[in-house]
Amino acid sequence: MIELNRIDPLASGEPEMSMQCEKIDTCPFFAQFRDDSGVIKGGWIAVFCNDKVKALDCARKKHLMQTGEMAPENMTPGGTFL
């Protein structure tokens, strides 16, 4: 049986340092909740920030890529406003 080598399209050839979004520690949205480890913050982080592929769905990152401007601080990763 022939075994095919699969190439990971997201692999950079360098050791993976973190699977989290690169902006998790500097995101202005989460700075509002820095002292709150509640369900709200944890839920968004679980859905959008703990995986670099899922982080591509973050409305805040999409806003930055489309407009070149930081998203409003009250814009959630899901795109709604608080």
Image (spheres, rainbow, N blue to C red):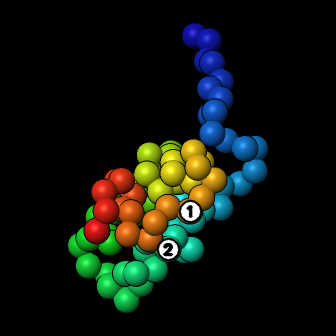
Residue tagged 1:
70
On the question of residue 74 being in view, the answer is yes
In-image side of 67 versus 55 (left or right): right
Question: Measured from the top left, where is residue 9 in percent x and y?
Answer: 63, 33
Res 23 quadrant in image: bottom right
Q: Is residue 66 above or below residue 40?
A: above
Label 1 crowd bin: few (<14), some (14–19), many (20+), radius 10 Å: some
Res 8 quadrant in image: top right
Residue tagged 2:
28
| Quadrant (top left/top right/bottom left/bottom right) for the N terminus | top right
From this viewpoint, which residue is outermost toward the top? 1
Q: What's the amino acid at mark 2?
A: Pro
- Disc number at residue 59? none
Mark 2 and mark 1: span between their CA atoms?
9 Å
Q: Closer to the observer: label 2 or label 1?
A: 1
Label 2 crowd bin: few (<14), some (14–19), many (20+), radius 10 Å: some
Residue shown at 44%/52% (left/top)? 58
Label located before the other in sequence (2 or 1): 2
Q: Nearer the viewer, residue 81 or 19?
A: 81
Question: Measured from the top left, where is residue 27 in percent x and y?
Answer: 52, 70
Badge 2 marks a residue whose secondary structure is helix
Q: How many marks?
A: 2
Q: Nearer the viewer, residue 54 or 9?
A: 54
From this viewpoint, which residue is outermost toward the bottom? 35
Badge 1 marks a residue whose secondary structure is loop
Question: Measured from the top left, where is residue 22 in percent x and y?
Answer: 60, 62
Q: What's the amino acid at mark 1?
A: Met
| Quadrant (top left/top right/bottom left/bottom right) for the C terminus | bottom left
In-image side of 43 versus 23 (left or right): left
2 and 1 marks in contact (CB < 8 Å): yes
Residue shown at 36%/62% (left/top)? 76
Residue shown at 47%/57% (left/top)? 60
